[in-house]
Amino acid sequence: MEIVAYTPQYLPALRALYMVTRTSTFTWLDSSGYQIKDFDEHITDDTVYLVVADDKVLGFIAVCEPDNFIHHLFVADAAQGMGVGSALLTMLSELNGRPQILKCMVENEKAMQFYLRKGFAEVGKGTGSVGDYLVLKK
């Protein structure tokens, strides 16, 4: 397993991972409007790192660097529990040493538990176009 910076060669795999994982994770949302190109639009201003093993993309993190705001942390369903998300968070911490901040949908209980186990704490909350979220910081 290795963490690499995004390059265009990974775009098809990242698009597919994003599409499939969004659908399987956010089951309470209407996914009928999801499109494969959504990935491109949702990471426009972000820096993206991904975990690769045996030429397969296992997960990725998309970060807005000025604020160290994590816009997306997605792990393929088959790779969950293998340390992919943890490795990405650790890499980000080692890379810049700055506090990490993110929004997590309240309904996404699995992700919420993951972030709390990793030392994130609630620093705010709000309601967006797709529901309630907590702002978490570490």
Image (cartoon, helix red, strand yellow):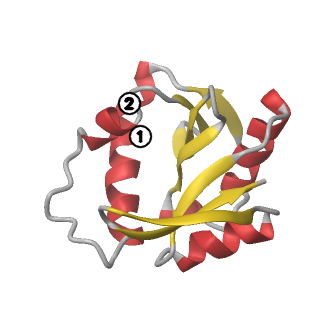
Residue 52 seen from this side: no
Identify which amino acid the numbered label 2 is placed on.
Answer: Leu
Seen from the viewer's position, the closer of residues 123 and 15 is: 123
Toward the left, the furthest residue is 32
Among the 4 quarters of the image, the one containing residue 110: bottom right
What residue is shown with label 2? Answer: 11
Residue beneath label 1, please?
14
Task: Looking at the picture, tell me which residue is in the foreground, 61 or 67.
Answer: 67
- The answer to whether 134 is drawn above or below residue 18 in the figure is below
Amino acid type of the residue that numbered disc 1 sits on in the rendered structure: Leu
The picture places residue 16, in percent across and down from the top left corner, at 33, 47
Q: Residues within 10 Å of mark 1 (few under 14, many from 20)?
A: many
| Residue 81, image x, y percentages | 67, 68
Say which residue appears at 32% left-offset and 66% top-offset: 130
Are dots 1 and 2 in contact, CB under 8 Å?
yes
Residue at the spot 66% in from the left edge and 60% down from the top edge: 136
> Which of the 4 quarters of the picture holds residue 12?
top left
Q: Position of residue 66 (x, y in %)?
A: 62, 26
Mark 2 falls on what kind of element? helix
Q: CA distance from mark 1 to mark 2?
A: 5 Å
